[in-house]
Amino acid sequence: GAGVSQSPRYKVAKRGQDVALRCDPISGHVSLFWYQQALGQGPEFLTYFQNEAQLDKSGLPSDRFFAERPEGSVSTLKIQRTQQEDSAVYLCASSLAVTNNQPQHFGDGTRLSIL
Amino acid sequence: ELKVEQNPLFLSMQEGKNYTIYCNYSTTSDRLYWYRQDPGKSLESLFVLLSNGAVKQEGRLMASLDTKARLSTLHITAAVHDLSATYFCAVLTTSGTYKYIFGTGTRLKVLA
């Protein structure tokens, strides 16, 4: 079946521009996570949704980062007034539910480059 | 703050050799995950370890969990080139909310 889909795969933006990254989780998956992965590092937690509720956004680096999942399926991560340090791969992962012990399924990520 | 540390960070080994990657974490958790990531690709789940003493094996990889020592190991037996990748462990923390904390990764290169 279809896995987690992220778009775009690559995004180049000038510093100061706003960007929006999309995540289509596996159908029926309740839990959705966003991560930021810098080159040579492990994924860093950004935010967690359970259905449409954003239960934890403690990993968002600043108030320029905003995530939503209004209907409990597709999620969007928005970064306003981008800065060079925002350059990274942004990964989305989903699972049926965090409590069912199954691993997360990851998308291929969006590689964001800020010039 | 929960920390997850892996060692070694880099590992270059000959085909046919055995080696172990270590994952230490700093707080109580009974769920540990191992993932593989190929260059430019996303993360692929390898193992889910749910209890103290859990051991799982798939092909040349075997993972174990010691929750008392807060330690998981990923053992590679008779390495082959196809195992070259970066391996991450991740711990689920449930204090307050659910959050997966990943280690820094071990970049494995198997030389022919």
Image (tube, grey):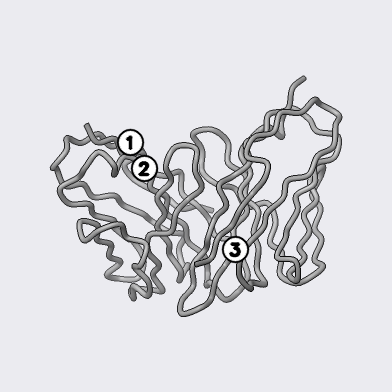
The answer to whether A56 appears left or right of A96 in the picture is: left
Q: Chain of mark 3?
A: B
The numbered mark, 1 or 2, whose residue comes first in the sequence reads 1
Q: Chain of mark 2?
A: A
Q: Classify mark 2: residues with Cα within 10 Å, few (<14), some (14-19) or many (20+).
A: many
Instruction: Check whether the beta carbons of the residues at disc 1 and disc 2 lie within 8 A of each other.
Output: yes
User: As displayed, is residue A88 above or below residue B110?
Assistant: below
**Residue at the image position 77 percent from the left and 54 percent from the top:** B63
Instruction: Check whether the beta carbons of the residues at disc 1 and disc 3 lie within 8 A of each other.
Output: no
For this rendering, which residue is in front, B57 or A85? A85
Which labelled disc corresponds to residue A10? 1
The answer to whether A62 appears left or right of A102 in the picture is: left
User: As displayed, is residue B79 above or below residue B33?
Assistant: above
Q: Residue furthest bottom?
A: B96
Which labelled disc corresponds to residue B91? 3
Q: Quadrant of the C terminus of chain B?
A: top right
Task: Give the Cα distance between marks 3 and 2.
Answer: 24 Å
What amino acid type is highlighted by mark number 2?
Thr
